[in-house]
Every structure is written in C-alpha cells, then in structure tokens.
Amino acid sequence: MTLTERGHSRVLRTRRFAARFGAETITSVVESGTIVKEGDELLRLDTLQIEEQIHERSKYAHWCKAGEVQLKAHMNRSKLAIKSYLEGEFVEELTDLEKELSLAKSKVLIAQTMLNHNRMMAQRGYLSDLKLEQAEFDLSQAKEDLGVRKTNIDVLKKYTKAERLEKLQGAWKSATAEYKAAAERTFADEHRRDVAIEEFKHCVVKAPRSGMVIHPKAARWKNAPEVQEGATVYKNQVLLLMPNLDKMQIKIGVHESILKRITPGLTARVTLPDRTLDGKVVSVSKVARPAGWWSGNVVKYDAVIQLPPIKDLKPGMSAEVEVLIAARKQVLTVPVAAIVETENNETLCWIHTPQGIEKQILRTGENNDKFVEILSGVEAGQKVVLNPLAYVTEAQQEALKITGSAKTIRNKSTKPGDSTKSKSDRSKSKPKHAFPRAKESRPGRGAPTAAGLLRCVDRRSARNLNVRCRQEMTS
C-alpha cells in the first residue's frame, strides 16, 4: 500500500551570505543561478565610506594611545613617590630629628653637670649667686629643647607621615584612574578601527567552494529585488545563497489519518519531470502545518524524503512522491470507485452475473487511493461495477438511506431556540465513512435526484462501467 503526494525538491543545507553591516551600496553582484568556482567574486560593496572610517578611527586610536602612555608614566611616578617618601625622605627627616634629640640630651647632661659643679663652687665661696642662677637657666633651657626635639619626632611619625602618604596615595590613585580612562578610550577607538577593517574585508564576498549561487526571494510587497546593483543593504540581510546540491530532499504533507503509518526508514519512489529516483523517509514532523482556507482546512504533517546525490538536480523542481507503507503479495483488490459504504457501515459492491447485477457484502483490509484489499465477498475474475451510484438503482437507494438518516439526526439535534448552534457542532452529528459517497440533500429541497447523485460521481471513470477483480501485488 502506498501514499502518493506532491512536493518540490529542496536542499538540505544552504550556505548563507549575510551583510555584517548596513547602509552600504552593492556595486556588483553575480546573476542568480550562476555556477561559480572556488574563489570567484560573488558580490562587492562600496568601500569609500568604510575606508574613510578606518582612517578616522586610526587617527583617534593613535592620539588616545599617546595620552595613555603619558598617563601610565605619570601613574608609575606617583607610585614611586610613595616608596621614595617611605624609604627615603621620611627616613632622612627622622634621622635628622633623632640626631637633634641626641644633641639635646647631651646638652641637658652637660648643663646638669655644670650646675652641680657651680653649686659646689658656690658652697665654697668661689662663685657668685648670679653664676649659679645662670647654670640653672642653662639646664632648664636644655630640658625644654629636649622636649621640643621629642615632640618633633612624634609629630613626624604620627601626623606628617600620614599627611604626606595620603597626599601621595591620592595623587597615585588619581593618576591610575586617568590612565584607566585613557586605556578605555584607546581600546574603544582601536576596536572601532578593527571593526571597520573587518567590515572592509567583508565588502567582497568570494565563493568558498564550487557550486550554484542564487539570490534570496524578495518580499511580495516590494516592487524590485533586494539584491541588485545600486541597492542599499541593511545589517544581517541575506545577500546570497549557495545551496549544497549534493544533498537534496523533498517535503510532502501527510494527512493526520495515516500519520502513524509513516515512519522514518520507509522507502519512497520520487518521480521528477525527467527521471525517477528512489529515496527514503528521514523524518516526520510532530507538529502539524497551519491549516486554513488556502489548504481546505486539511491538517497535514511534514515528512522529509531524502534523495540520492544526482547531477543536474536543482531546488524547486516539482515531484510526485509515492511512499511504500505496506506490501501485500498476491492479494485480491477492487478499485475504490466500485465501493459503497452503507448506513450500517457495511462495505458493498455490485458484480455482473448471468442473472444480472447483484450486490455483494465485502470484508476489506488495507487500501490506498486506487485499490482496496478484499478479504472476502468476491473472487478473482468477477466483474464489478465502477461508480454504482451512477448506474445501479440499489446503490442509489443505499445513498438515499444515508441521506435520510443524516436528515433525521440533524432534525433531532436542532430544537426551537437552538438556531445559534455552530456549524462544527452540526457537522459532528454526521456519520463518518471511509469511502466517498453521494452528497446529502440540503434541508428544504427534498430528496436528491438521480442527476444530483450523478454529480458526485467521478466523471473521468464514468465511461468505464465494468472491470474485473484482479489478483496482484499492490505496492
């Protein structure tokens, strides 16, 4: 049993060439569908504006770099000044004060010795009281000088050192901040320059390999193609496409009723305009296509058929895909057009006998869009009537029974005041059947006529009334 659907060839992988920047003009581009070789030029953009931007950014980058170097030297000097003060100037000042302290101590000792000597001499009457007072004054002055020296050392250690360190460290932090700001400006300008240089490299697009180059489709509302000489590009715009023609596939739609029967690995026969290929199902989508009025509200799922590598196979070629769902060998089949399903879900057909046309109840198996597998009811070689609704009165009566049942269900489901019932709710009350049947009559127009029944018949097969049941392998 097979599933037949139509689709179009498409590539599995496509190399996209997108614009790295915008507001540039296309100066040259190859025609869509051109076969190119590796290294061939495909597209070129105007580079005048980018070249000016490169020169401008390079100038600012050099200026910022010069300022960064100067501020870095100033930062290093500020850092060295802290070390110079702690290990040089501060030590020198402290040493000088300690020397003065030692000298003051020696002066106090000398003054004390002189005072003791003068007191002894005064007791013996060799010195006057004035000389003794002078010695006492010298000792007092020496002690005061000693206290000043000690205070100077304490002030240096506690306050002067801290003040100088705070000032030097503040200068170093300020220089560091200025240096970092200059470094950021340098980095920003160099980055802008590098971006401009990188954009300049992408102004010319070359083919990475041999193959076909095509233009992307323009939007329907645009009057002119987006990729042509003189057009302005925008950032991330797809400029060219380079499909890999060695790996092609076809996407078809699978009806929800047989979705479970289509699995990856099934074989498929693909008929193209000029050849027939063998492929296989590689994937089945788990999400349905959007259904709408354009698709007749039919729910379908995408299935991908992989094709073997074939030369001269291009994307967009129409194809008919026949997927082999199941194989039945030496089975009895009847055309779908000969089958009628009744109100009681019985499957009927009509055969030719010497006594005339007779009804047969069938037990069916698998089916496709052309034939139905028959398990019992008819035998090989018997002639069946195609489109019995058009030619067999009994088949038309079965159709009228179905129509009457549908009207009864509809009348029962429609009550006074229930005129707002949705169409979807009314449609749920209709019986569902596996095979097509005559259309039901509209309310208020009476029973369907023979002409109405004939309109539902496939006109292409109306000319052939009889066909023999055949025993064959359906694939």
Image (cartoon, rainbow, N blue to C red):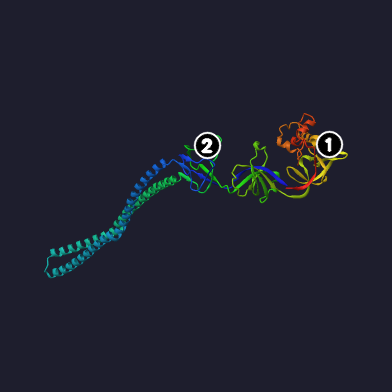
Three-letter amino acid code at disc 2? Pro
Query: What is the quadrant of residue 115 in the picture?
Result: bottom left
Query: What is the quadrant of residue 165 in the picture?
Result: bottom left
Q: How many marks?
A: 2
Q: Secondary structure at mark 1?
A: helix
Q: Local crowd at mark 1 within 10 Å, few (<14), some, or many (≥20)?
A: some
**Residue lying farthest to the left in this orientation:** 126
**Residue 225: mark:** 2
- At which x and y percent is residue 97? 24, 61
**Left or right: 475 with respect to 317?**
right
For discs 1 and 2, the disc positioned in front in the rendered view: 2
Mark 1 — residue? 394
Inter-mark Cα distance, 1 to 2: 62 Å
- At which x and y percent is residue 390? 79, 34
- At which x and y percent is residue 382? 83, 43
**Residue lying farthest to the top in this orientation:** 445
- In this orientation, does residue 400 appear? no
* Residue beneath the point at 40% across and 43% down: 51
Viewer-side residue, 146 vs 203: 203
- Check whether the beta carbons of the residues at disc 1 and disc 2 lie within 8 A of each other: no
Viewer-side residue, 275 vs 236: 275
